[in-house]
């Protein structure tokens, strides 16, 4: 396989990846403590590395989702014995919000609503939940 401009260095192994809605960025998460890397699709240059805050050995990023405007990135985490959704500002790396539920051993799905104001999540027990994105991080209305 030939190396392309957006090839990423090998790590433990990649769990999930996602393109931003405009296709200009690409996020990829590995199984262990390598963080979530966001790169420019055109040339592979780094935009940011986001820290999922792994505390234990049994932690993995299950799914990723960009907000409709591409400013936010949500990660569904299996964090030891609890589920977490973490949302970051992609450009600054600021952790915008954390949604935690100790009754869930791991979120397995996450998606933004088309207006970017809500997150839909799923878990291994088949429960779907909706959570509000903090209002100060809603996309600007067009």
Image (tube, rainbow, N blue to C red):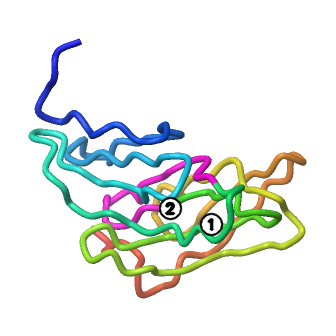
Name the residue located 9 percent from the left edge and 41 percent from the top edge: 43
The residue indicated by pointer 1 is 85
Name the residue located 80 percent from the left edge and 72 percent from the top edge: 101
Residue 38 placement, left or right of 32: left
Task: Say which quarter of the image contains residue 102.
Answer: bottom right
Residue 105 placement, left or right of 34: right
The residue indicated by pointer 2 is 74
Q: Secondary structure at mark 1?
A: strand
Q: Is residue 14 above or below residue 63?
A: above
Name the residue located 61 percent from the left edge and 75 percent from the top edge: 132
Q: Which residues are magenta?
A: 60-73
Q: Earlier in the sequence, mark 2 or mark 1?
A: 2
Task: Say which quarter of the image contains residue 78.
Answer: bottom right
Question: Which residue occupies the extreme bottom position in the image?
Answer: 136
Q: Is residue 37 above or below residue 80?
A: above
Give 130 or 95, whichever is nearer the viewer. 95
């Amino acid at each position: 396989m030939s190396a392309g401009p957006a090839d990423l260095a090998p790590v433990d192994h990649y769990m999930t990846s996602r393109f931003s809605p405009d296709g200009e960025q690409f996020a990829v998460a590995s199984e262990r403590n390598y963080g979530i890397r966001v790169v420019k699709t055109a040339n592979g240059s780094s935009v940011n590395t986001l820290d999922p805050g792994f505390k234990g050995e049994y932690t993995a990023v299950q799914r990723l989702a960009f907000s409709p405007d591409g400013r936010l990135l949500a990660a569904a985490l299996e964090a030891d014995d609890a589920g977490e959704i973490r949302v970051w500002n992609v450009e600054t790396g600021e952790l915008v919000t954390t949604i935690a539920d100790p009754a869930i051993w791991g979120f397995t799905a996450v998606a933004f609503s088309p207006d970017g104001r809500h997150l839909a999540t799923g878990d291994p027990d088949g429960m779907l939940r909706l959570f509000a994105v903090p209002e100060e991080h809603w996309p600007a209305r067009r």
